[in-house]
Each structure stands twice: as C-alpha cells, then as structure tokens.
Image: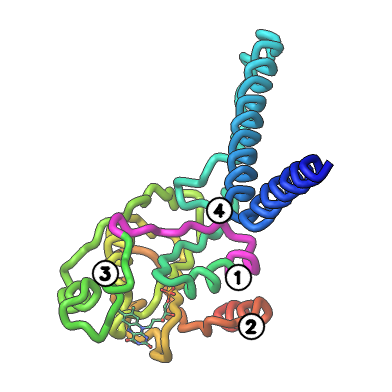
C-alpha cells in the first residue's frame, strides 16, 4: 500500500511539473503557435479569395466580360483634377504644396479647370535648400537661361480665355520651369493672371518676366497671395482686377 501511495505521489508530481512547464513558457511557444496559426489562416484566406475570384470570373457571362472596365479608380496622369470645359484654367507649379492650396481655392472660386505642372525631375529637399550655393535651385536660379523639363505639359490652352499661372517665388523670380511652360504655349487672345506664394517677397518682376518670355497674351500684373488666403479674399482680389 505504501508503495502504491508513493507511486501515485510520483505520478501527480510529474503531472504537476509538466503543467508548470507549460505555464512558465507560455509567452514564446504560445505566441509562435498563434503566429503560425495566423499565417496559416491568412494563407487559407488568400487562397479562398483567389478561388472566389476565379469562380466569379468563370461565372461571368461573355457579355459581362466584354463590358468596358470602370476607370474611376485610374490615377490621374495628365495633371487635370477635373476637365469641365470651363473658359478659365489655373495652371500651377508647387514644390511644397503652398501654391497648390491657393491654386485650388482660385479654381474653386472661378469654377476653373486646374492643372498641376510636375517637374520631369522632382525637387528634393536638398534641391530646395536655398542656403546651399550648390543646390539645384540655386544653380537654376543663377542662370536665367536654364529651362527645366516638365513631366506632363500636355495641357491644351485652346479652349480657355483666362489663364491663371501660379508658382512659388524663388530668389525673387518664378522658378525656371515656369519659363519652360510659358515659352511652350500661345497665349494670344487670352488674359493671363500670374500669382505666387512666397515667404514674404512680392510678385516683383516675376510676372512681367514670364510675360516677355511668353511673347503673347494680355498679361495682368497679378499678385502674391497669402498661403492662407480665403475664398472670399480671392473673390475680392479678382473683383479688384476687373
Ligand atoms: C529655392 C527657394 C528660394 C526661395 N526664395 C524666396 C524668395 O526670394 N522670397 C521669398 O519670400 N520666399 C522665397 N522662398 C519661399 C517660397 O517662395 C515659399 O515657401 C512658397 O510659398 C513655397 O511654395 P510651394 O509650397 O508651392 O512650393 C524660396 C523657396 C525656395 C525653395
């Protein structure tokens, strides 16, 4: 009997250790197991998705398969946010987003189309460092003949009678890429209104420089607009030009 009791005690003890072992090491092995399970589940899920896509496709009728794809989700590649057939367009370049915000408000106030000019080579932070004598912008702005390429200048200005042209002030002037733009277009018969944003400088000669580079169009003086200008202030500015 004594032997039986001792044997039973030994068995309970072993069971107790095993249970303790599981509890003590629960964090790592258990986590491994659940990660494994999640991976397995995800694998199963994606297999299921693939399978259901296959089923859906095979269940489609030939007519459905032939129907044109919906293109609403296609990314815009031509610079247009919207092409509404308006008689006014806002064309702008914005390296860091300030001019973009103002351009969007002008387009909203004037019911205009809007077109963002994208540099063929985007400006990095280092390129925009005006404290660096060797930065790309410093080098470009020191040379009035530089004409940086535009990635997407496919805008057709034919249908527009008024063109707003927006840009940031760089070293007191419009970025050279704006010269690339105006030299490539015919502004004959159009009213052109330059506008800019800046750290404080006015529009200066940037608008008249662009006007002479363009060589056509009825260029108004334009203005420097505050980054936070409201739509009603934009409306006042426009009314003041008429
Ligand atoms: C290379 C460089 C030169 C600049 N030169 C001037 C300047 O001469 N006068 C000024 O007030 N702001 C200057 N700025 C500031 C920009 O005009 C201002 O931050 C502008 O609102 C940026 O517009 P964006 O965000 O549309 O690019 C300069 C900025 C850069 C990057």
Residue shown at 62% from the left, 14% from the top: 66
Classify mark 3: helix, strand or loop: helix
Q: CA distance from mark 2 to mark 3?
A: 29 Å
Q: Position of residue 139 (x, y in %)?
A: 17, 75
Q: CA distance from mark 2 to mark 1?
A: 10 Å
Q: What residue is disc 4 on?
A: 81
Assess disc 4: are there few (<14), some (14-19) or many (≥20) residues with their C-alpha within 10 Å of its C-alpha.
few
Seen as rendered, the residue at the extreme bottom is: 200
Classify mark 2: helix, strand or loop: helix
Callout in the foreground (2, 1) = 1
Classify mark 1: helix, strand or loop: helix
Residue 170 within the magenta-colored segment of the rendering: no
Within the image, what quadrant is residue 168 found in? bottom left
* Among numbered discs 3 and 1, the one appearing first in the sequence: 1
Q: CA distance from mark 3 to mark 1?
A: 24 Å
Within the image, what quadrant is residue 167 found in? bottom left
Q: Position of residue 52 (x, y in %)?
A: 68, 21
> What is the image's colouring?
rainbow
Residue in the foreground of this view, choosing between 6 and 45 = 6
The residues colored magenta run 106-121
Q: What residue is disc 1 on?
A: 105
* Among numbered discs 2 and 1, the one appearing first in the sequence: 1
Q: Is residue 116 visible?
A: yes
* Among numbered discs 3 and 4, the one appearing first in the sequence: 4
* Among numbered discs 1 and 4, the one appearing first in the sequence: 4
Q: What residue is disc 2 on?
A: 233
Assess disc 3: are there few (<14), some (14-19) or many (≥20) residues with their C-alpha within 10 Å of its C-alpha.
many
Q: Quadrant of the N terminus?
A: top right
Q: CA distance from mark 2 to mark 4?
A: 23 Å
Residue 181's place in the image compared with 51, above or below, is: below
Q: What residue is disc 3 on?
A: 176
Q: Position of residue 142 (x, y in %)?
A: 17, 78
């Amino acid at each position: 009997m004594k032997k039986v009791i001792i044997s039973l005690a030994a068995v309970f003890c072993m069971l107790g250790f095993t249970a303790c072992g599981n509890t003590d090491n629960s964090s790592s092995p258990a986590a491994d197991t659940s990660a494994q399970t999640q991976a397995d589940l995800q694998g199963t899920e994606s297999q299921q998705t693939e399978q259901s896509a296959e089923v859906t496709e095979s269940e489609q009728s030939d007519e459905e398969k032939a129907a044109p794809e919906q293109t609403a989700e296609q990314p815009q590649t031509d610079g247009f946010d919207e092409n509404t057939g308006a008689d006014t367009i806002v064309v702008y370049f914005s390296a860091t987003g300030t001019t973009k915000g103002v351009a969007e408000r002008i387009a909203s106030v004037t019911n205009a189309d809007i077109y963002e000019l994208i540099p063929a080579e985007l400006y990095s932070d280092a390129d925009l460092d005006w404290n660096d004598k060797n930065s790309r912008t410093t080098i470009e702005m020191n040379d009035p003949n530089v004409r940086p390429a535009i990635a997407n200048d496919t805008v057709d200005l034919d249908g527009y009678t008024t063109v707003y042209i927006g840009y940031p002030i760089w070293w007191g002037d419009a970025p050279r890429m704006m010269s690339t733009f105006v030299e490539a277009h015919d502004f004959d018969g159009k009213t052109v209104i330059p506008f800019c944003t800046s750290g404080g400088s006015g529009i200066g000669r940037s608008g008249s420089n662009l006007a002479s580079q363009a060589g056509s169009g009825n260029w108004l003086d334009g203005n420097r607009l505050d980054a936070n200008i409201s739509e009603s202030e934009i409306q006042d500015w426009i009314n003041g030009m008429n």
